[in-house]
Image: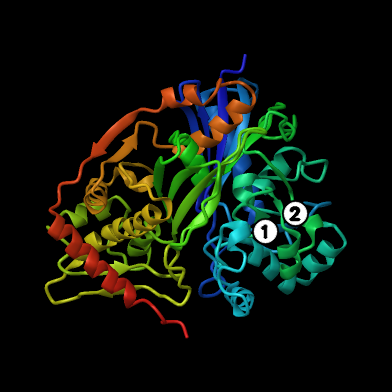
Amino acid sequence: MANYVGALDQGTTSNRFIIFDHSGKIVGLDQKEHEQIFPKPGWVEHNPLEIWQNTRDVILGALANAQLAGSDLAAVGITNQRETTVLWDKHTGKPYTNAVVWQCTRTDEICKQLVRDHGQNRFRDKTGLPIATYFSGPKIKWILDNVAPARKAADKGQALFGTMETWIIWWLTGGPDGGSHVTDVTNASRTMLMDLQTLQWDEEILQVMGIPPQILPRIVPSSDSTTWGTSRKDGPFDAEIPVCGALGDQQAALVGQTCFDMGEAKNTYGTGCFLLLNTGTTPTVSRQGLLTTLGYQINDQAPVYCLEGSIAITGALVQWLRDNLGLISSAPEIETLAQTVEDNGGAYFVPAFSGLFAPYWRSDARGVIVGLTRYVNKGHIARAVLEASAYQTRDIVNAMNKDSGVELSRLKVDGGMVTNEVLMQFQSDMLNVPVIRPKVSETTALGAAYAAGLAVGFWSGLDELRQNWAEDKTWHPAMALAVREKYYREWKKAVDRTFNWVE
């Protein structure tokens, strides 16, 4: 009998395969980083073939670490960096170009053209999204417009588009030999091409973008008992395992944190920062600069929607401090350095390296450090780097409170940065609510595992998943109101200084 579920976490910087038991405990894990390719300023790419090879490697590695065989897994789920876009030849599996990563801003001109006559909210009522470089639709258009073989093949019906879960599922289930070409509702909702109400590709938007519908995958539930096929016997599992769960990474974390009730929220602190609020089975169109997105769908049940606030740079700012400036030699050192000072010394760091995401949506913004005096040292800079994540999160929460009419009462947190005590305490202070870290930190992979496990009956339903969730630590606010508001007021002044940098 299969006693475990596997989940692939296809992230921005690495692939991880994690094996969970019935209680949600990790029994096996392997991880492998992939290359970050920067051909031009603002451009970010990945090699899809490297990611597929690394996927196979980490599956084999995790099984070996757990001393399990592929046949010990009841199902496989996938979670992924959501908007990253790849087009490939359906007969060979060869990509026409490198994957265009969610952070990439090369579609800026395309977005400007789309906005010119109709405004940034041209498609928002249908898709829940503003026009921005972030989403997959403009990335598809860029590839079709700039890579001649891709356009030719797309028009002939020989090309396939996918975000990274689509790419992986296609290969796992057979690739050129009958691989399943699907995307789940959460990832489809990040393309700027799907109608939120119908959960179908929108013909009008496709026409405006010049995207042939035949290249698009079939839209499926996040947890699908009909499954999308099985892994190949000659593949990395050496067994036929149902592939039946998929969620974009942030939605997967929402499921992993068991935020199944309306009004529950989670924030993931990774390369970027992503806060999702469950708004129930009716989409709430934001008037505050947030995104309306799919949270999850289980089989043919009503889909659950979310408001989302996306912050481009949080953990990536710590990496920048390490790699570009050499102020620290490893990411955990940021906390030690920040603890050498009592406060930020008046310094604020707004990391608008590729513009500002929610709630500002300013592609013309660029990063600034303000408030510098001779007093400021590297400890203050380190603290300003950490505080930037907390301030940006408060920006999002303020917008969510206005859109939803519901005041946040607590925040569940996950991701690599939640081990940072300085940041978590400051986050609680900034929001003036408890911040709660779960015992299982790998909530993104766990959410994908839950989606797959639910599809095959490994878990009976949402109540059983709720019982698996357990608190590890809670931070409570301890900052005086006047101090909190002074910090935030100065942060907003710093944000204003980033605007209109790109002419």
| Residue 203 x %, y % | 76, 60
Residue type at numbered disc 2: Leu
- The quadrant holding residue 327 is bottom left
Q: Nearer the viewer, mark 1 or mark 2?
A: 1
**Which of the two residues, 304 or 96, is positioned nearer the viewer here?**
304
**Which of the two residues, 338 or 434, is positioned nearer the viewer here?**
434
Regarding residue 433, the answer to whether it shows in the image is yes
Residue type at numbered disc 1: Leu
Identify the residue at the far front of this view. Answer: 405
Q: Residues within 10 Å of mark 2 (few under 14, many from 20)?
A: many
Q: Which mark is residue 193?
A: 1
Regarding residue 84, the answer to whether it shows in the image is no
- The quadrant holding residue 243 is top right
Residue linked to disc 2: 216
- The quadrant holding residue 470 is top left
Q: Are marks 1 and 2 in contact (CB under 8 Å)?
A: yes
Left/right placement of residue 494 relative to residue 135 reads left
Is residue 479 positioned above or below 260 on the image? below
What residue sits 46% from the left and 59% below the top? 290
Q: Which mark is residue 427?
A: none
| Residue 349 x %, y % | 29, 68
Is residue 494 positioned above or below 262 on the image? below
Identify the residue at the far right of this view. Answer: 156
Identify the residue at the far bottom of this view. Answer: 503
What residue sits 20% from the left and 74% below the top? 371
Q: For marks 1 and 2, give the CA distance.
A: 10 Å
Secondary structure under tag 1 reads loop
Left/right placement of residue 38 relative to residue 154 reads left
| N-terminal-most mark, 1 or 2 | 1
Secondary structure under tag 2 reads loop
**Which of the two residues, 245 or 75, is positioned nearer the viewer here?**
245
What residue sits 44% from the left and 46% below the top? 277
